[in-house]
Amino acid sequence: MSTTTTLAPVLSMTGVSKRFGAVQALKDIDFDVAAGEVVALVGDNGAGKSTLVKTIAGVYSPDGGRIVFDGSPVTITSPSQAQALGIATVFQDLALCDNLDVVGNLFLGNEVLRKRALDEVTMEQESWRLLRELSAKIPSVRIPVASLSGGQRQTVAIARSLLGAPKVVMLDEPTAALGVAQTAEVLNLVERLREKGLGVILISHNMSDVMAVADRVAVLRLGLNNGVFRVADTNSQEIIAAITGATTNAVTARAARRAPQEEQS
Amino acid sequence: MTTSQTPPSTDPTGAGPVPSDLQDERLIASQGIGGWASATWDRVRSGDLGSLPVVVGLVLIWGVFYALNPLFLSSRNLVNLTVQMVPIGVIAIGVVLVLLLGQIDLSVGSMSGLAGAVVAVLFVNQGLNIWVAIAAALVVGVATGLVYGMLFNRFGVPSFVITLAGLLVLLGLQIRTLGTDGTINLPFESGLVQFASQQFLPAALAYVLAVAVPAVYLLTRLNTDRRRSAAGLSAQPLATVALRAGLLTVLLLAATYVLNRDRGVSYMVVLFVVLVVVMDLVIRRTRWGRSVLAIGGNVEAARRAGINVKRVYLTVFTLCSTFAALGGVLAAGRLASANQSSGGADTNLNAIAAAVIGGTSLFGGRGSAYSALLGILVIFSISNGLALLSVSSDVRFVVTGAVLLLAVVIDSLSRRSRVAHGRA
Ligand SMILES: Nc1ncnc2c1ncn2[C@@H]1O[C@H](COP(=O)(O)OP(=O)(O)O)[C@@H](O)[C@H]1O
Ligand SMILES: [Mg+2]
């Protein structure tokens, strides 16, 4: 199951483990992503995907293992350190401040200053530029994010991660709350990030999305590596089998049941 | 997917390109003063009340007390009112800060009492320079806040428990500091007492300030609007800005006129208002202030945004205790004495109630430094008005308690309404 990438990884981790009390959320995980590559991270609910993302993002510190970023070993102890390295994250639980407006959330922790005071004009202008670039449909950037829809909040969170020129972008189920058009926008965006030479880690439950944009698919199952596939050499069935851990499973059984019915009608 | 790019939109009136923040077709156009008024009304209806309830409340309270005893609105009484409220008002500024973080400091009363005791002992008993004594009192405030912040960051104990313990410790220190005397009187000629009770702005200077402050406001607004227009963003209509500046001028001139008919505007009041304005700017316009609001809104989001959350907690607890110490120093100056009950009784609750009544939410992330000013005006209007009616302190406690309860209920209701209207 080893896959050789032609590109040097910008982020690679070996033997990373994380335990929450009695739950071994991650065990000996190997994972890497190269510059200009989209790696999809898939797995059932509770497989440990979000935990892996948060470990890379500095939210959790791993119990063991090695992380190499840009050629040098690093210990990521805080979210700000991850950001400083160039790792941007869109968390599954978006982590926006409901009481702040869109501009405030976009620039939180990276505010633009002018004479030591917040430069609201420049930040607002920049917000519009960024949101237009993402074709975001947000009526006003001066309303608290609490008043935005799920998809709009998602867009704000994604736009937020792109400020400050990251090298690696992690998106934890970015399309779960989105409509058809916005999902397509996010996938376009992922491709644009790849073209810009960023490493992208995309978590998604949607196999067609994964097959559409990813270069490789890494499967987690119950906190363990369960295979890495090149999208060019695989198909959805193979990946679903790795996710569920069996060749016959609920998904294939369902497909088999449906096939004869469709022939009858 | 290809979104059809909207053609460069133009103003329906044909006056040129629409600012980039007004291009979304779902935005309900609100232009001119009428638009501003209707937008404000919409905000209020959705539960974003801001300082509206307290302003309405203040007008009502003044009306009622004036009807019961016209002396309430006499210049003499209003000057008394402005001077009385300052020490606890200064304490309330610090309380606003901790509330914005979603925390609380229950020990501001005894902090102020201890600070008063330190000033009195060092200045009167030890014969030190008054400035040295004041500085020492403020240092005690800083140290107390640092301890709170470190305990909070290190052990994660809820702030109300830490500061409740602090309340007792500080009270003990206050009694010990005062020693056997129990009460220390500050000499009437000392600078602190003079400043806190005897010194007023020259009448002419007060009028100049009453005009200059709105002028500065107008100029900064116009400057911002110019930058916004240059950046392709919408600017507030000139009429709205001018109207606001005009209203502010009328308000300040009227207040100055009324106060100047008696002794005038006390230096201590000027100090208080300057502190409020400065803290308001710090909260709204600096990176640190933005961090405070962010932590009050969602501490995990703030942490993940790379904000040094612990440092913000530490600085806010420190500032709060320092404001409490400053309030205690001013109280000692105003009363020309420090004793065992300084900062006791209702000081603590009045300071906290002022912040909440003024419109700072107990739930964190929402409020402004101005709530210290507005809230303390309400509380001291009530106690001053009741005192004029020769009502005893038992009634005063009950009334102030009822007003506080009302403010908290309004806070909770408006929070619920904001959730329902998507402004939580
Ligand atoms: N903060 C936490 N504390 C305790 N257990 C956790 C925590 N976060 C995740 N877990 C556990 O770790 C496992 C993996 O969770 P998660 O990474 O969120 O899965 P996924 O994102 O793949 O659905 C789950 O069993 C979950 O209950
Ligand atoms: Mg998850």
Image (tube, rainbow, N blue to C red):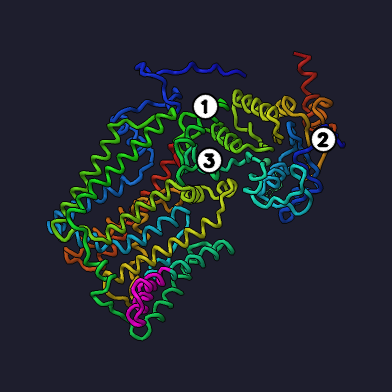
Compute the Cα span from label 3 to label 2.
36 Å
Q: Quadrant of residue B195?
A: bottom left
Residue at image coords 46%, 50%: B289
Q: Quadrant of residue B91?
A: bottom left
Question: What residue does disc 2 label?
Answer: A228
Query: Is residue B327 shown above or below B14?
Result: below
Name the amino acid, label 2: Val
Question: What residue does disc 1 label?
Answer: A137
Which of disc 1 and disc 2 is earlier in sequence? Answer: 1
Residue extending farthest bottom: B180
Q: Give the mark count.
A: 3
Compute the Cα span from label 1 to label 3.
19 Å
Coordinates of residue B287 in the picture (x, y in percent): 49, 48
Question: What residue does disc 3 label?
Answer: A107
Between circles 3 and 2, the one closer to the viewer is: 3
Tell me which secondary structure the magenta stretch mostly adopts.
Answer: helix
Name the amino acid, label 3: Phe
